[in-house]
Amino acid sequence: MAQSNPPFMSGVPELLLLRLLNDQEMYGYELVRSIKKVTNEAISLGEGVIYPVLHSLERNGSLKSKRKAVGGRTRVYYSLTKKGHDRLEKLREDWRRIQGGVAIALENPANA
Amino acid sequence: MREPDFSSLATALLKSGITPRHAHRTVNELRDHYDDLVDAAVDEGASSKLARRTASNQLGRMDEFVSEMAARRELKTWSFRYPHLAVVVYPLACLAVLPAAPVLAGIAHREVLIRWGASLLGAGLVTALMLLIMQISIILG
């Protein structure tokens, strides 16, 4: 798997996928491109990395999928469920808390 | 990097315990993703050969992809998630099914059974009729 990001990125693909799918349904290739775009290429996921995450999220009920024939290909489009919305909110809160904590530690290392 | 071998990928995913539904769908999605990457490279001016090589590199190694999938317990079949339980349940299930096997086989081949049954019944009736005639002829002397 093309590993584009360091290990501390664990959990970030899930958060980004849920955030993007909160706006509209998308398929795998579209999601990878969108992540690059919305993060100004700061985060570039390996092309295949998202599929295990997508399937896991679908398995736990956060996402649902449907097939659509587009341009001669059958795409699997993913969209968020109610459980997915709740999961996104929880991850968003977790992320903000961690982000805040790291920011404080970086600005005032003595208090860290 | 060589072109991805998607048929081997499906086999490897199934062997690692991924459910058939997730294994086959993942392979189809990756194949489409690869085609999209090739198309994108061609659109940027790459030759067909270079586009395929670039797409393969971007997609990554298939064995690492299998490891990524296999690390997710929720995508595996129950017998891979609970191997100790499977060791107990499968033999018990076989024992339970064993007595029902002839019945199930009969249901599956009911047309043949009906044909054979009708033939045996017909043969039995003819034999009984012949024996009856013989018996009557003996009695009548």
Image: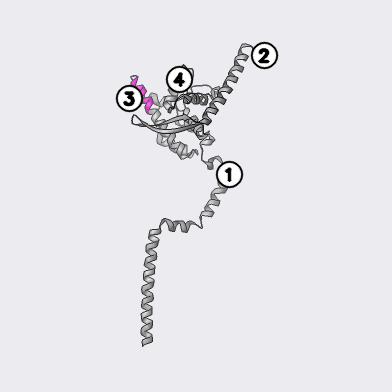
Q: Residues within 10 Å of mark 2 (few under 14, many from 20)?
A: few
Q: Toward which corner of the image does residue A95 lie, by quadrant?
A: top right
Identify the residue position indicated by label 2 in the image: A111
What amino acid is labelled 4 in the image? Lys
- Looking at the rendered image, the quarter that the C terminus of chain A falls into is top right
Q: Chain of mark 4?
A: A
What amino acid is labelled 2 in the image? Asn
Q: Using the image as rendered, state which of residue B123 and residue A2 is in the foreground.
A: B123
Residue in the picture at 51% in, 40% down: B77
Left or right: B75 with respect to B125? right
What's the CA distance linking mark 2 and mark 4?
35 Å
What's the CA distance linking mark 3 and mark 1?
50 Å
Sequence-earlier tag: 2 or 4 = 4
Front: mark 2 or 1: 2
Identify the residue position indicated by label 3 in the image: B48
Residue in the picture at 44% in, 24% down: A32
Identify the residue position indicated by label 4 in the image: A36
The residues colored magenta run B35-52
